[in-house]
Amino acid sequence: MNVGLPKEIKDNENRVGLVPSGVAALTRAGHEVVVEAGAGGGSGIEDGEYEAAGGKILPSADAVFARAEMIVKVKEPIEPEYERMREGQILFTYLHLAPAGTLTDVLLKRRVTGVAYETITAANGTLPLLTPMSEVAGRMSVHVGAYYLQKSNGGRGVLLSGVPGVPPADVVIIGGGVVGTNAAKIAAGMGADVTVLEASPDRMRELDDIFMGRVKTVASNPHTLEAGCRRADLLIGAVLIPGAAAPKLVSRTMIGTMKKGAVAVDVAVDQGGCFETTHATTHSKPTYLVDDVIHYCVANMPGAVARTSTFALTNSTLRYALELANKGFERAVGENPHLAAGVNTYKGKLTYEAVAQAQGKSFTPLEKTL
Ligand SMILES: NC(=O)c1ccc[n+]([C@@H]2O[C@H](COP(=O)([O-])OP(=O)(O)OC[C@H]3O[C@@H](n4cnc5c(N)ncnc54)[C@H](O)[C@@H]3O)[C@@H](O)[C@H]2O)c1
């Protein structure tokens, strides 16, 4: 198969869909990989590294899209990319189609095979191509919290670890899933006093086993949330109810009881946020104040550490790209129901039910189109 790797053009997107080792794996398997010049630049990967891995550098995105049978990307295509996609081309990327009516129409009209990272499933019911970005965002939430707690950055002037004779900061994490666990790891590693508020008793048992008492778990309810907010130097929102908007667990009143100069990082902002006071921010202006509490609510946190995020993402996506390239689309999705779950559009039909429902469009099961 001919696989194409264009440069991402969405604002501030520095990740890239394949790293040189991925290109090497594809070429070793007998495929051709065409790479747009400069595609890896935002992640610190030179064209020469792709060439050394067997990739062929092409001068423009137009050339890559024209040649490739499968395009491997990171973000959903934006306007200038619409025209480049063509019938039967596989588009393997994050798509997030539910709120994107125009893009969905383009993929259907142009009969593009849209395979979305975010809907590919794993045998244990998780979404394996979302996990690496949750790991990045969870770990990063503590870095940004520590940074904004510094007086010079508007915070209350607290060092997460404390020092001998001065107690560590209180880090309160709401939700002990992938984001919450990774946040807890880094916060505990930095010496903070860490509490995770979780709704699932089973998950609390797992956290207790993982952290062996180094991190406290508390059953999440309005009472414990109130107490957590009053105590926190750094509050991290990390809940998820799959497929639903994040529940507003932290009310405006609770934020009002927090210490002045405390920091509230709402990682769940991409699902609407779990603080009543959350609104989405960007890397160019990441924070705002509510009741003297610094809010950090960036919806694409992994973008700040593009190189790490690129390698983390491609570690997980490559096996599916190889499966699609080695077997061809129909055999690959026929043999792997978890990969088939990623197919959102095929042959001009919308094959992902939740997207069809969200947009009031008709849904066609993938099996009926194969
Ligand atoms: N902002 C970003 O850049 C970014 C990056 C990655 C992920 N995210 C988002 O972070 C959120 C968390 O993702 P995740 O991968 O950790 O999800 P996850 O499913 O692994 O974890 C969510 C956890 O929340 C718990 N939970 C549910 N209701 C709760 C409640 N009332 N109180 C306490 N805990 C509750 C669940 O039991 C689960 O353990 C998602 O919204 C995800 O989209 C944001």
Image (tube, grey):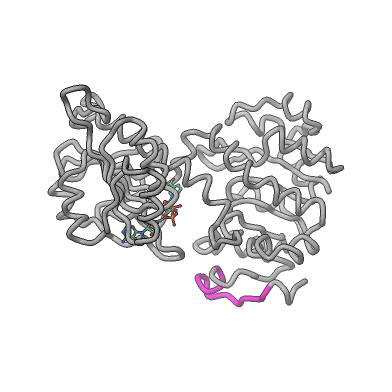
Rendered position, 46 above or below 126: above
x, y percentage for residue 204?
Answer: 35, 55
Quadrant position of residue 154: top left
Location of the C terminus (image quadrant): bottom right
* 176 left or right, relative to 98: left
Q: Residue at x 31, y 47 (%)?
A: 173
The residue lying toward the viewer, choosing from 22 and 214, is: 214
Q: Residue at x 60, y 77 (%)?
A: 362
Rendered position, 25 above or below 203: above
Q: Residue at x 33, y 48 (%)?
A: 266
The residue lying toward the viewer, choosing from 2 and 149, is: 149
x, y percentage for residue 185?
Answer: 39, 39
Q: Residues in magenta? A: 355-365
* 364 left or right, relative to 129: right
Q: Residue at x 27, y 58 (%)?
A: 219
Magenta stretch: includes residue 109: no
Instruction: Count numbered badges in the picture.
Output: 0
Image-quarter location of ligand 1: bottom left
